[in-house]
Image: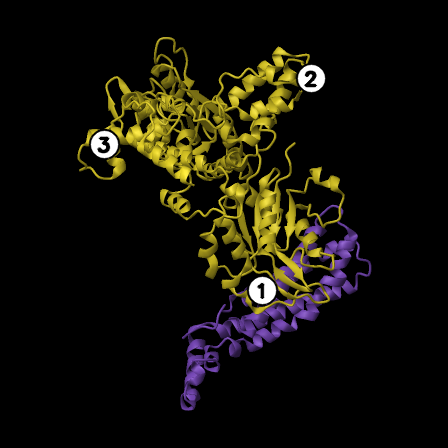
Chain colours: A yellow, B purple
Amino acid sequence: MNALPRVLVIDDDFGRDWSGANRKRKGFCDRAGLLDITSDFEQDRKKIHERKEDVLAAAVFCSGLRNVNGSAEHDLEGTLDIIRRGWSEWPRWGLVFLDLKFITGKIGPDGDPEGRKCDADPKEFFGLTILERMFRDPVMKEIPVVILSGMERNRIEERFANHGALDFEPKKEELGDARLSELLDAHGLIEAEAVDVNGRRTALVGHSVSFLKCLREARRRARRAAENDVGDNILILGESGTGKQLIAEYLHGRAMGIKSRRGKPIGQFRTLFTQGAPETLIDDRLSGHMKGAFTGAKSDEPGEAEQADNGTLFIDEFGCIPPILQPKFLRLLDKNTREIQRLGANSEPRKVRLQVVMATNEMDVLHGGGFRGDILARIGIGEAIGLPPLRDRQEDILSLANLFLRKYEREFKAQKREISEAAKKKLLEYGWPGNVRELEDAMIAAVDNSRGLRALTPNHLKLKGIVSRTSTPRLETSGLTSSQISQETSSLTLDELLRLVESFQFDPYNHAHIDGVWNRLEAAHARMLKNYLRAALISERRKRPGKPEGEPKPVPTVLRMLGDPKKKNQKYLAGRIIRKILSAIPREEIFSDPVLREMEERYPREVDKPGKDDVEGRADATSD
Amino acid sequence: MLNDWQDRRSKFNHDWLKNGFLANLNTFLVRLGKKSPVQEDLEFFIREELPEWERRIAEADWLFKTVEDEMSPKRYFDVPPLVHCGEETKQWLPELVHTLWLDRYPVQKLRTDGSAALSRANSEYAALKTALQRTRILSLERLRPLKSRLVALRDAASDLRDILSAFDQDVRRI
């Protein structure tokens, strides 16, 4: 059973009553379906773990104030500390409700502060100060915040919208359980339901931030698909083995749930596999056929698209669709037509209403390689749901490992086992290039090979490689995988990154900030230049017969990097710069990357010998 | 800087009516709908939270009666720099500004609507109070039939809240 989603309510109404009664908080919880787990709230601790029917989430309340000699004062650092601590480990805040106006001043006999005029001044709202501090913090800015206030919003709309607030809940007296449920669904970082629509236990297990953000995006898209009469087209990008089909099923379950509640017709989840299948078979599976359409077509058969009418058509490995079939997919993906015609049919095409979920790990989709522009325009690349690779979901690894262990212990009738500390370490340090599928395979092997044992030790983990979590993942010959692109393109813009680097100040009184950081700084600088070179090489690749992934062009690449196409001695310059960048990176790291390996081979580094700089450096050191 | 009227409006409307009275009233309605609410919570609302209406509602009356004077842009003539205007100018300009303000913005209509909403809410409260006086025992069975009266009070108080929120957030400049 999943943990209850946890919400943080930062509101002076709840908790500022120092007399201890705090009835407002209790009333708020009763209205919104919350279980108060604030440490100052007297209750049976066991209740936290009981999933009561009318409880949607567990709530921690924070007044944002502190009592200073009988006066209520804003407590910015204390509040930020509570936010930060509750975010650092699971169960972390799924949603934060933030009030705007916090009443300060001398605390009266009734426990309420008398208030100051500045408390109600929109320019001085303490809630906005908290929000702005959260937004400036690279970790806390990920936390979903909904403004919860009875104050007039017009004059401050831009300010809170610009600092990451996701919604504004205008009147707290109206926040009931139905609305809380909507807000959690739309904005909350919450786990997937433990069972799917058919009541089966789902493997959508995990609570890492990247995975929960992916689920939230999936819920958003499912909502939109369910609201649209002709459905929607949704693209899922993720490396092989990350669980794209599970996300597609999640999308289906969510969308069908919404449609069902609204009395709309619902349909089936159908899958169309394209990888390795001949064109004719893909066409037949997608469109269906009429009797006599081809040899062996003994009766009329609907295709997957028709069978998924009002439901979901999941197209796995969408990148493998042959070019010749693309016009047919276009008719299906175009929401104005949404039609399909069976092979051999003479009648008008059939209209269908469905959500089309496409999954791929082919970055060619993003680069437009092999796809018609009109198809790319319809699959919603810009809104693709990115499924993170397992190496980016470290806190999910052990939960998933345990999930698979329990499953296969039951299946093989094996002993129930615990994962030893050393095995946990090995699981966490491994890079999981094959993602969740590889982890599942490893657990199957571990259980199958030692059915009678009650401990899983490092010896039982037959991992394919020695890829460490921190090493650079290999590139596939067909291009970059989605996660590699997402690793390269962080949410920071280049300007933001440079500003951040340029303005970073080291703390002169914090030894950990200074001691031995030189090597890391040098390495980080070198890697950044390497990533820059790699991106430029890929962007300048030219396709040639026999080289569908493209051929690198070092000279235009370097000129592009330097932003000056008129440089003299272009070939010499390109060689010098590429050699300089690569020489700062360990050879094995370069050789694990086909794009850079080719450059290393073309511009081999010189044999190490002491250079002028080295000698000068030593002289400096000696004189010190 | 906020003036006194805005400050008192904020304390009454935001701090008490929205976050206190209406929130408590809604909670009570939610609890009435539950299978087995805590009796103590129900009694606390009827005995302590609901009667707060009588203690606070005069503030709404004051807000409606004074809004035209307190929020008028003629107030700018009481503080620098317009306080330095010549006496002769002060004889006519503040009143002209006030008249223009009333002409351009629906202050008087809001005031009239607000007073009417206040009167309605007071009537609903009085009716509920009478009904409660007939109900000596505050059991769930006795309280549930009063739900429609409670909802009527909530709706009237919500109208009052909305009208109070609709007044300007600042003293306007004409």
The foreground one among A574 and A46 is A574
The spot of residue A302 in percent (x, y) is 42, 20
Chain for mark 3?
A
| Direction from residue A512 to residue B82 in the image, left or right | left
Q: Is residue B9 above or below residue A58?
A: below
In what quadrant of the picture does the C terminus of chain A appear?
top left
Q: Which residue is mark 3?
A: A573
Q: Is residue A168 above or below residue B125?
A: above
Distance of label 3 from label 1 (alpha carbons): 72 Å
Chain for mark 1?
B
Tell me the kind of residue under disc 1: Arg
Would you say the residues marked 3 and 1 are in contact, meaning their CB atoms lie under 8 Å apart? no
Q: Which residue is mark 1?
A: B161
Classed neighbour count for the residue bearing mark 1: other residues with Cα under 10 Å, few (<14), some (14–19), many (≥20): many
Tell me the kind of residue under disc 3: Leu
Classed neighbour count for the residue bearing mark 3: other residues with Cα under 10 Å, few (<14), some (14–19), many (≥20): some
